[in-house]
Every structure is written in structure tokens, then in C-alpha cells.
Image (cartoon, grey):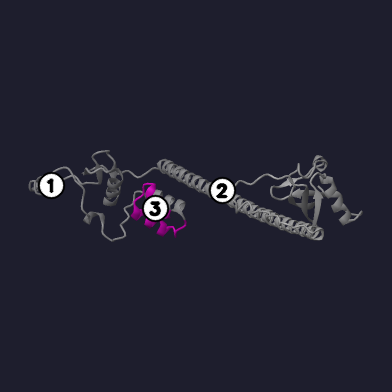
Amino acid sequence: MSDIQTLVDMGFPKEKAERALQVTNNKGVEAAMEWLLAHADEDIPSSSGSSSSTQQQPEVEGPTSEDATPSTATDEAAPVAKSLKCDECGKLFKSQDEVEFHAAKTQHSSFSESTEEKKPLSEDEKKAQLALLEEKMKRKRQEREENEKKEAQERERLRIKSGKDMLEAKRKLEEQEMKKVMDQRRREKLEEKAARDRVRAQIEADKAARKAKQAGESFVAPAPAPVVTSPTDSPKPAVSKTYTNARIQIRMLDGSTLVETFDAKEQLAAVRLFVQLKLGNASAPFGLMTNFPRKVFSGDDFDNSLDKLGLVPSAVLIVTKAQ
């Protein structure tokens, strides 16, 4: 908000506010207020250059020049109007500018000339008015600071919410990627098993054919084994399977990766021993954890089997420094 608008909001006419700021070299609202209070009784001309006497007068009660009777030399001198008065609230004004400002602010429309002279403000009245204006400025400043504080809090809340939403979206994306990797590994294992079964069946059929040929008997080849399809290709629900092995991928502290297959019933302590042997006897204490879902294994977990810990048929373990 500009200094002129601040002074206008306090009740000063715009022309006087502009004049006060000009005289005080634009040193601020307080300096302009002190000048306005010190020169409250002076008639300051408007910036347009027109005097208050040439502007249109508001509605004035009393006889007009047309209704007035011609004065004679013997008549007494007519009283001189020393101020303008608001007939609705009784307030006195020295200039037309003050009348127009009061009318715009209060919507009062009835004014008349008055022989009463507007008394200048006393020092106590000036101090009281200055105190009221300073209190009004203080309230406006407090309201502005409170609004700025609320806006800053709202911006911070939106920033935190946006950060949480981004983290949640990133977590879901990583889970989806991990699920795709696990499904791909499952399909590959099923395909490898189906290929081994076909080869094994073909070997058995070849053995049976050789035996029948040596014995001079006829041999009928068995029907080929059905092809096992992956769960994503079959419309039937996946059949649960009991795994006997666990393929564990271990990420070491130096960034290298080890892959080892363990029995599904082996304890997690076997994996820790395997890592310790790879690191050497002089290795520092370490821990094991999973990333998706995140789980840090404690002392009791090392006594549980791999299938009970959900590390079957395959899993990724990360070696961490001991806390």
C-alpha cells in the first residue's frame, strides 16, 4: 500500500496527503502525519490549481442571491460565512476539499455555510489525534503481518504435502518395478523347469526305446509332457508351490554383489556366516536388511528359517554397517 493511500485511509484528503509527502521529502507516513496535524487549520490548494471558492458548492441551505432582497445603505452588513457545516452531523470544514472528502466518506449530502469559525486543534488534541492515527497504523501493520504469516504457513503446508505426495508416488513406482522383476524371474524359472522336464522326458524315452530294441520288442513313445505356461499367460489362478531352495543376492559394502543358493529351511544365520567368510575373519561387525519392503534383521531373526522370513524363492539382502 502506498503512503498516500495509507494517509487517505486515516481520514486525510488526498491533496493534503500529497502535499505533506512532498513537503517532508517523502520521508514516510509518520513525518507526513506530523506535518498534517501541525498544519491542520491551513487551506492547502488542490493539485489541479483550482481554488475551493471556484468549485461547485454542495447543497447549501438559506436564501439564494435571487431570493435575497436588495440591500440598502441603511441595512446592516450581512454575516460573513467562516466555514461550511454538515447539517447531518454538525461537523465544520474550512474548505471545499474537506467537504467533498467528508461527503465521499460518510455519504452525507446536506451542507450549509456557517458563521462559526473552525477552531484550530490544540496541542492536546493534536497529540490525541496523532496517537489514534498511530494506533490505527499499528493495527493495520499487525493485520498485514498476520496475513503474511498465514500465507507463509499455507505455502509451507503445501510444500510439505507436495513432498509427501512425491515420495509416495516414488515408493509406489519402485514397488511396481520390483513386482515386475519378481514376475519376470518367476516366469523364467517356470520356463527353465519346463525345459528341463522335457529334456528329462526325452532322455527317458530314448532309454526305453534302446531297451525295447535290444529286447526285440516294439516301443510306443509316450505322449509329450504338457507345456507349462507362466502365470501371466494362463487365465487360471496360480497354484501355490512349496520351494525348497532360496536364491539370495547379497550386496556387499563395497558395492559388489554375491549370489548363493541356500536351502529354504536354513536359518538366516547361515547367510550371515557365508558373508562373514567372504569378508574374512578380520571383518568388522555387520548387519543384514532388505529394501523392499524395508526390514532390518535383528538377533532373533537369524534363528528363523529363510522361508519363514519370506526370503524364498529369491531375495536381495543388503550388508550394512553395525549400529
The residue stretch that appears in magenta: 1-27
Amino acid carrying mark 2 in the image: Lys
Magenta stretch encompasses residue 8: yes
Q: Earlier in the sequence, mark 1 or mark 2?
A: 1
- Cα gap from disc 1 to disc 2, whole angstroms: 72 Å
Q: Secondary structure at mark 1?
A: loop
Instruction: Tell me residue 208's x, y (percent).
Output: 78, 57
Label 2, label 3: how many angstroms apart (C-alpha)? 38 Å
Distance (Cα) linking label 3 and label 1: 38 Å
Whole-percent x and y of residue 39?
Answer: 38, 51
Quadrant in which residue 265 is drawn = top right
* Numbered disc in front, either 2 or 3: 2
Q: Residue 239: x and y, percent?
A: 66, 45
Q: Amino acid at mark 3?
A: Gln
159 left or right, relative to 52: right
| Res. 292 visible in picture | yes
Q: Is residue 76 above or below residue 255?
A: above
Check disc 2 and report the residue beneath it. 161
- What's the mark number on residue 64? 1
